[in-house]
Amino acid sequence: MEELWEPAAEGPDFPVVWRGYDRRQVDEYVRNLTTGGTTDPRPGGPPPVFDVVLRGYDRRAVERYINGFGR
């Protein structure tokens, strides 16, 4: 039986679109980013890579958030 997915309790409220970034992957990345985890969004570093799925987060909204984090 597939586990039901629950969005992150805190953090940005990204719009869900027909084809977008995997919500679990994005939530985990943002959680690490905001809690000082291992994710490093420094300028010039490699961008994060997320799977594209049906009913995922809007790609532009996620990229805007990640690119603007820490500025």
Image (cartoon, rainbow, N blue to C red):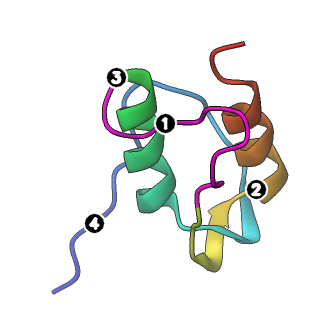
Q: Residue at x 36, y 30 (%)?
A: 9
Report the quarter where the N terminus lies: bottom left
For badge 2, the amino acid type reads Asp
Are there few (<14), some (14-19), or many (20+) residues within 10 Å of tag 2? some
Residue 25: assigned label: none
From the viewer's perspective, tell me whether residue 54 is left or right of residue 40.
right
Q: Residue at x 44, y 31 (%)?
A: 33
Q: Residue at x 75, y 63 (%)?
A: 17
Secondary structure under the numbered disc 3 in the rendered image = loop
Question: Which residue of the protein is positioned furthest toward the top in this rendering?
Answer: 71
* Image spot of residue 31 (x, y percent): 38, 35
Query: Badge 2 is on which residue?
Result: 58
Q: Residue at x 54, y 67 (%)?
A: 22
For badge 3, the amino acid type reads Gly
The CA distance from mark 3 to mark 4 is: 27 Å
Secondary structure under the numbered disc 4 in the rendered image = loop
The CA distance from mark 1 to mark 2 is: 21 Å
**Badge 4 vs badge 1, beta-carbon distance below 8 Å:** no
Which of discs 4 and 1 lies nearer the camera? The answer is 1
**Badge 3 vs badge 2, beta-carbon distance below 8 Å:** no
For badge 1, the amino acid type reads Asp
Which of discs 3 and 4 lies nearer the camera? The answer is 3
Question: Which residue of the protein is positioned furthest toward the left in this rendering?
Answer: 1
**Residue numbers of the magenta segment:** 36-48
From the viewer's perspective, tell me whether residue 28 is left or right of residue 30.
left
Q: Is residue 54 above or below residue 7?
A: below
